[in-house]
Image (tube, grey):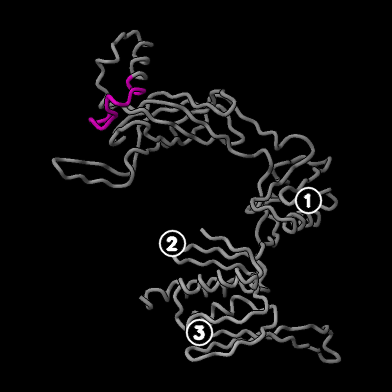
Amino acid sequence: MRSAMRPIILTIALLLAACQPGHALLTRIKDIARINGLTEHKLMGYGLVVGLDGSGDSSRAVFTVQSLASMLERFGVSVDPAQLRIKNVAAVMVAADLPAVADRGAKLDVLLSSLGDAQSLHGGTLLVTPLRAADGEVYALAEGPVTIGGFNYATGGDKIQKNHPVVGRVPGGATVTQSVRSEGLQGQQLCLLLHNPDYTTARRVAEAIEREFSPTGARALNDAMVQVQLPDDCADLVDYITRIEQLLVEPDTPARVVINERTGTVIIGEHVRIAPVAISHGSLTIQVRGEYQVSQPGPLAGGGTVVVPNEQMQVTEGGEGGIMMIPPQASLNDLVTALNALGVKPRDLIAIIQALHAAHALEAEVTIQ
């Protein structure tokens, strides 16, 4: 069991090594923000899948019986719903994403999910289904053969199933019926919305845009929104937005530790630090000591005097380890590295981190999943 747990701890150590302080992670604005108004619209509809090989809804799915009877009534066929056998028909909910900018005739992928007790949608065909947005308007029509990427066969008492047969897709199965234009590309202003709101990141985004297009009037309105004033001579808006998206910034992230106790996974952020504390877990005693040293360049070196932290860690296994005062600014990376060298199990690592947090010695936000 110990050898099986070591790869997980090794993975944690590798993640920490890749996120050492001092290595700036530059990211495109395109990857951390989006233009306000350029968001997809959710479309949804109710439809019927026909042509199933006896794997459709049973007569207990009353809504499927009523839907089939109503559809036949519109085609001039009057039937008694009680006489219908619908094993070749399944009621489904149909969902699709409508882009912020779309023209009539554009194709969308649709997702189907069974509503009744159908066994499989394999081989079925979705009948024409109107797809509506939140405003109640119909923006697309969906229809076509269903693909489920799996199968579900049963004979006698044996059953073989692959993937999830009651959820399927119709690639390009929806046709946009009315054009959609976004309000985000109108007027003389653009608003960028950060995926992860942060005041420092918002300021850095505004500064990067100012440096590239100075003066532009870019400013951070809050931790989630950056407003950009378009120049009066902006003839090509698409080119302007493309240049903004390709600018590089260094996102700032809070100190955070994410723990998943079910899988034994621990993710530790770059800025996590340990306050003065001594740790003793079972037979382990961990001591962290930090000192500051002054680096003075030569008379003609042209540099400046800097203070360099010098951190040391000592781990004692077995016996009675002494507990001593630990100076601040010790990195949690040092702690995990030492535990990894000793082959400490992830469960023990999680227990140590939770104890540090309870003692207010872990300067980070702890999220337990």
Tell whether 84 sits left or right of 35: left
Estimate how packed mark 3 is, as few (under 14), some (14 to 19) or many (20 or more) residues with alpha carbons within 10 Å: some
**Tag 2–tag 1 contact (CB < 8 Å):** no
Tell whether 321 sits left or right of 142: right
Viewer-proximal residue, 333 or 203? 333
Q: Amino acid at mark 3?
A: Leu
Q: Amino acid at mark 2?
A: Arg
Give the residue pinned by disc 1: 220
**Residue plotted at (45% across, 35% down):** 110
Estimate how packed mark 1 is, as few (under 14), some (14 to 19) or many (20 or more) residues with alpha carbons within 10 Å: many
Is 15 located above or below residue 186 in the figure?
A: below
Q: CA distance from mark 2 to mark 1?
A: 40 Å
Predominant secondary structure in magenta? loop
Q: Tag 3 or tag 1, which sits nearer the N-term?
A: 1
The number of discs equals 3
Q: Amino acid at mark 1?
A: Ala
Q: Which type of secondary structure does the marked residue at label 3 adopt?
A: strand
Q: Nearer the viewer, mark 2 or mark 1?
A: 2
Q: Which mark is residue 262?
A: 2
Q: Quadrant of the N terminus?
A: bottom left
Tell whether 11 sits left or right of 366: left
Is 101 located above or below residue 295 in the figure?
A: above
Give the residue pinned by disc 3: 284
Tell whether 84 sits left or right of 31: left
Q: CA distance from mark 1 to mark 3?
A: 48 Å
Q: CA distance from mark 2 to mark 3?
A: 24 Å
Q: Nearer the viewer, mark 2 or mark 3?
A: 3
Query: Quarter of the image holding residue 198?
Result: bottom right
Q: Nearer the viewer, mark 1 or mark 3?
A: 3
Estimate how packed mark 2 is, as few (under 14), some (14 to 19) or many (20 or more) residues with alpha carbons within 10 Å: few
- Looking at the rendering, the stretch of residues picked out in magenta corresponds to 52-65
